[in-house]
Amino acid sequence: IGYFIGSINPAYIFGKLKGIDIREVGTKNAGTTNLYHTFGAAYAVPTAIYDTLKGLLAMFIAWIWGANFTFMNFSGLFAIVGHIFPFYLKFKGGQGVASATGIMLFYLINYMFLINWVDFLFFLVFMLLLIGIFAYVTKTGEFLSILLLPIFGFYIYIQYPNEPYNPFLWIILLHIISIGFYNIISKKLIVIDDEGFKRHKWRVIARPFAVLFIIFHYYLVDVISVSIVGIVALAFILLDIIK
């Protein structure tokens, strides 16, 4: 049932009513964004609402029919599968980000109000601040998922390690992050100049390893973790001064 609910694609249906296959125009994605740029908000808004809620609808049906916790969550995941691989469209649908986001928001509500809503609220404020900073710096939303969702997943790991929603949340996060990487690569949002890369190759390669600082901070005492950050920062500052 989750798969069939997910396979109902309003973007494709609205496109057909207009005599157009939404998968053949614009970004060729049967999703809300492409529908908005093609037909406007009047069609995009109801599409966004249904696509966001379809996973929750599948979970709700499973729940009222007495399904257990695991089965209920898998029903939501299969709604995402149905959105991406609808059988009547030769298994070529949308990316499932809206459906995944709807389920993720449901998990957020559970974490916030059923565990420790005060701490979680502070974390959400922090995340919103980061979203504003990264959106301003990158000028595109594609980078937000790959930059911020890993931080959110790590926060859940250290704060709520035994929550039964965790495995399903991490599947959702992994899916959204994967779509973010796919869009960045397919849209060529990152272009590395060959000459610039050769001159600064080691620095470009080293930057992603900054995530280790978060791990150091979690597993080491504060004095050691902050000292590591300070030493690395000082080393890079000295290198720039020497240059």
Image (cartoon, grey):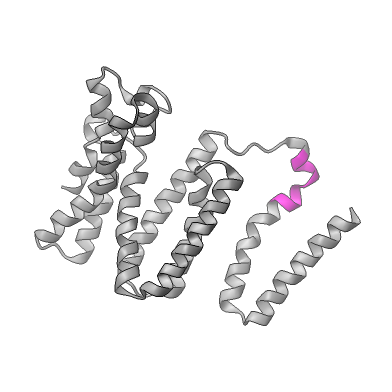
Q: Is residue 125 left or right of residue 93?
A: right
Residue sitting nearer the eye, 118 or 234: 118
- Residue 147 painted magenta: no
Residue that sits furthest to the left in the current view:
65
Residue that sits furthest to the top in the current view:
19
Q: Is residue 64 left or right of residue 205?
A: left
Magenta stretch: dominant SS?
helix
Q: Is residue 92 visible?
A: no
Q: Position of residue 23 (x, y in %)?
A: 35, 26
Q: Position of residue 187 (x, y in %)?
A: 53, 33
- Residue drawn 35% across and 62% down? 108
Residue that sits furthest to the right in the current view:
242
The image quadrant that residue 15 belongs to is top left
- Residue drawn 33% across and 50% down? 100
- Residue drawn 75% across and 47% down? 201
Q: Position of residue 26 (x, y in %)?
A: 42, 25
Count of numbered marks: 0
Residue sitting nearer the eye, 38 or 31: 38
Q: Is residue 196 visible?
A: yes
- Residue drawn 30% across and 67% down? 110
> In the picture shown, does residue 44 fall above or below 131?
above
- Residue 200 painted magenta: yes
> In the picture shown, does residue 42 fall above or below 78?
above
Question: Residues in magenta?
Answer: 196-204
> In the picture shown, does residue 180 fall above or below 115?
above
Q: Position of residue 218 (x, y in %)?
A: 56, 75
The image quadrant that residue 29 belongs to is top left
